[in-house]
Amino acid sequence: MGNSSSNRIKVQPPDLVSKKLESDRRMFNALEASSSTPSVVLLLTLRASRLRDKDVFSKSDPMCVVSQFVGRLTGNGQWKECGRTERLQNTLNPEWATQIRIEYFFEEKQTMKFEVYDIDSKSTELSAHDFLGRMECDLAEIVSSRPLVRPLSGLKGNCGEITIWSEEVDEGSKENVLFNLSARKLDKKDFFGKSDPFLNIYRVNDDGSRLLVHRTEAIMRELNPTWKPFEVNVKMLCFGDRSRDSIRARN
């Protein structure tokens, strides 16, 4: 359930932490788009488990920062940030709903870095937050694995692990499914008030694993919620096959 409890996962509304300056995004895209190598656009979906707990009175509030090493051929190599997930509150096993969009060049080595931080303020400076672990790999490894599961490192002891799915974006696929969802008579999970429910929509893969494709907003103190309408692309939802029994919802 996405209802509140003493150790609930709480979705943080968009704030300065989860936003990157648009000028930086344009700079990153310009650097990568200059290549004449054949490419496709990918969406990366991220999940972590058994993260280090940095908070004293609650669990960590993790966010993942994704960077790519660019300028390798020119000798001016540097890390360029290409996206951040949302911050999730009070969880050591986050499933981030924010997907990271990146261009995959077939004949180029693209080194990626995934860093997880415990976010405790609205500062966009990563140095202001507790580091929980990192993982580096080639983008080709992510594409070939589906998903790629790797341990996080950077701290003494176990830092947990990160799981990454890649999905090719079909630029020609414009068909979306519109969801209008509500629930009634949900269980009360808070001790001193009503629950704060949200809904996760998952795609069930051929191997039985599930992939988070959308998370609704949390509605505060409400046992009969009606969430805002939202759309999900058919390819992301069910591989474009409407006959598949491949969707699960959890609230």
Image (cartoon, rainbow, N blue to C red):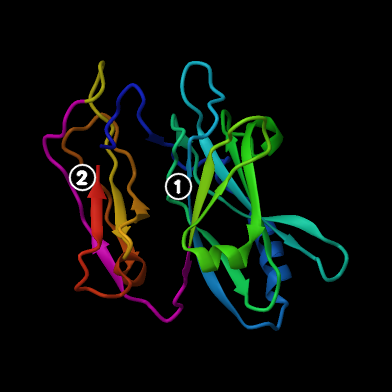
- Circles 2 and 1: CB atoms closer than 8 Å: no
Q: Amino acid at mark 2?
A: Thr
Q: Which residues are magenta?
A: 166-188
**Quadrant placement of the N terminus:** top left
Label 2: how many Cα within 10 Å (few below 14, some 14–19, many 20+): some
Q: Upstream in the sequence, badge 2 or badge 1?
A: 1
**Is residue 24 found inside the magenta-colored segment of the image?**
no
Displayed quadrant of residue 36: bottom right
Displayed quadrant of residue 237: bottom left
Q: Is residue 189 above or below residue 38?
A: above
Q: Residue at x 53, y 43 (%)?
A: 161
The residues bearing labels 2 and 1 have C-alpha atoms spaced at a distance of 22 Å
**Relative to 60, 116 lies left or right:** right
Image coordinates for residue 213, horizontal then vertical, percent:
36, 57
Magenta portion: prevailing SS class: loop
**Quadrant placement of the C terminus:** top left
